[in-house]
Image: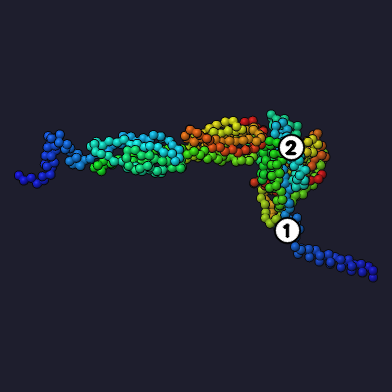
């Protein structure tokens, strides 16, 4: 009998040989090139939210099933990194607020690579920008029914809520776009001051953005009973 | 000889007059008030119709403002106050026809005071103070004042024992025909009470015209009763033409009795 394909037999022989001499450090995966990717256990920052131009240290913890030495390569969408290698980097936030991702690639000696990222919130210090879309400043309307109190509010970190005031009395709140509130004006008359305050998502040192309009309600009496 | 001379002169006068009449037919029609003149037009008098009720809290602001407003606009506007009856708001000047007239303009948000300038062209509803009401009236008037009208209204009033009859002539000026207009009349009275100088006392039924040709004159005889106890001698009659399509008042006059 003539053996035409010797390779399968050779592989079986080596596997058998390796198992006999397991202390020799020889592994099947290694032999046939099945190197596994490193595993990232965690990526963490000393601070999750920082101010513009502030810095935070970011760490990565990873391991390799083959216990190979690992190397780390860092990059960020924006802001600056103190260095691009190593298990720990220092990231300096950009000027603008928002959510930024810092990425890290972890690679073993065999070239197997895995990636991970962390999101750092940069809290913009400015107050939210807020505008009352309706009613308009100086609007004159009969005191009948209701009007839609509509507001446009924005902040790089998002808006937590918008509060609505009429003549300094809180009349409602809204925490989702479009920010609005129905204002009942039936039977009302005279000058009314409408104010809105918009708060950004992060609560610390949270100065609201404000806008204000004055409208004139002209009293009118319905002749038909509702 | 004298007799022949007189006959000759009379004949000559007749010939001259005939020639003059013939010549008149060829004259250009330049008179702006002539309905046959295609360029004819008139200034439009602004009809201000205020729907009010004395028992409602905001009406006094509008009434006081109207008194002052009247002194400012003079003959450029005619003011009519319709005191609208309402079960919960008694009003000594309430006129049953006022409700229908208000309903012509508004059926949902019937709330007083509510003032219309040339029909639905301008509307001022509500009042929060004398000053704000006057300011809004002035703003509405500023938009409507100075507009031209393509209608001329004339009317004769005949007062009978228990009724008043109006002979109305509505001439269509300009170069185009018009459809769906009506003429109507309202008697107003100055009661001598502040804020009640243009109180509507009677409303004549409207007369509609589906078509008035350019340069034509439509006529209507409007009759309304004189309610018992009313002193029609104190009335002034307002006659107006209005589009039943867009509810714009097209012309208004104040008729002398």
**Residue plotted at (49% across, 36% down):** A200
Quadrant containing the N terminus of chain A is top left
Horizontal relation, residue A20 to residue B108: left or right? left
Displayed quadrant of residue B207: top right
Q: Which chain carries label 1?
A: B
**Residue plotted at (12% across, 44% down):** A7
Residue named by callout 2: B63
Co-location on one chain, circles 1 and 2: yes
Neighbor class of circle 2 (other Cα within 10 Å; few <14, some 14-19, many 20+) is many
Query: Is residue A158 visible to the viewer in this orientation of the structure?
Result: yes
Q: Relative to the observer, which residue lies in front, A47 or A223?
A: A47
**Residue plotted at (50% across, 34% down):** A206
Q: Mark 2 lies on which chain?
A: B
Displayed quadrant of residue A108: top left
Look at the picture and state if B215 lies above or below A207.
Answer: below
Residue A195: % across, % down? 58, 35
**Residue plotted at (24% across, 36% down):** A67
Neighbor class of circle 1 (other Cα within 10 Å; few <14, some 14-19, many 20+) is some
Q: Is mark 1 on a helix, strand or loop?
A: loop
Residue A49: % across, % down? 43, 35
Residue extending farthest to the front is A82
Q: Looking at the image, is mark 1 or mark 2 earlier in the sequence?
A: 1
Q: Which colour scheme is used?
A: rainbow
Mark 1 vs mark 2: give the one in front.
Answer: 2
Residue named by callout 1: B37
């Amino acid at each position: 009998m003539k053996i035409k394909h010797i390779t399968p037999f050779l592989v079986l022989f080596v596997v058998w040989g390796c198992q006999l001499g397991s202390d020799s450090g020889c592994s099947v995966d290694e032999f046939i090139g099945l190197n596994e990717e490193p595993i990232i256990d965690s990526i963490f920052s000393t601070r999750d939210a920082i101010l513009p131009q502030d810095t935070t240290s970011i760490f990565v913890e990873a391991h390799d099933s083959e216990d190979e030495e690992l190397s780390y390569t860092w990059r960020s969408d924006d802001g600056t990194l103190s260095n691009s290698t190593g298990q720990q980097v220092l990231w300096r936030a950009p000027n603008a607020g928002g959510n930024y991702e810092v990425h890290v690639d972890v690679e073993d000696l065999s070239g197997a690579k895995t990636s991970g990222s962390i999101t750092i919130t940069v809290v913009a210090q400015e107050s939210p920008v807020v505008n009352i879309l309706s009613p308009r400043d100086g609007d004159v309307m009969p005191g009948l029914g209701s009007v839609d109190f509509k507001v446009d509010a924005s902040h790089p970190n998002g808006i937590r809520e918008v509060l609505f005031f009429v003549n300094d009395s809180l009349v409602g709140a809204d925490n989702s776009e479009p920010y609005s509130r129905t204002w009942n004006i039936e039977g009302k008359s005279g000058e009314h001051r409408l104010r809105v305050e918009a708060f950004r998502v992060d609560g610390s040192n949270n100065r609201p953005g404000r806008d204000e309009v004055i409208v004139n309600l002209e009293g009118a009496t319905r002749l038909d009973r509702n | 000889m004298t007799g022949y001379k007189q006959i000759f002169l009379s004949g000559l006068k007749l010939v001259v007059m005939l020639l003059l009449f013939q010549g008149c037919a060829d004259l250009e029609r330049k008179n702006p008030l002539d309905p046959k003149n295609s360029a004819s037009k008139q200034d439009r008098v602004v009809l201000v119709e205020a729907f009010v009720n004395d028992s409602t809290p905001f009406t006094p602001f509008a009434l006081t403002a109207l008194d002052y407003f009247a002194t400012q606009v003079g003959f450029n506007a005619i003011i009519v106050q319709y005191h609208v009856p309402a079960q919960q708001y008694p009003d000594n000047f309430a006129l049953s026809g006022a409700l229908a007239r208000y309903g012509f303009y508004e059926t949902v948000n019937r709330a007083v005071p509510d003032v219309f300038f040339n029909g639905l062209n301008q509307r001022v509803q509500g009042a929060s103070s004398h000053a704000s009401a006057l300011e809004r009236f002035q703003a509405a008037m500023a938009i409507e004042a100075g507009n031209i009208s393509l209608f001329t209204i004339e009317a004769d009033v005949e007062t009978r024992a228990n009724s008043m009859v109006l002979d109305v002539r509505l001439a269509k000026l300009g170069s185009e025909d018009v459809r769906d207009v009506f003429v109507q009349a309202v008697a107003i009275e100055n009661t001598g009470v502040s804020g009640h100088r243009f109180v509507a006392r009677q409303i004549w039924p409207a007369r509609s015209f589906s078509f008035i040709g350019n340069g034509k004159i439509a006529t209507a005889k409007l009759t309304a009763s004189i309610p018992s106890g009313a002193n029609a001698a104190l009335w002034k009659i307002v006659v107006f033409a209005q589009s039943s399509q867009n509810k714009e008042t097209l012309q208004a006059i104040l008729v002398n009795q």
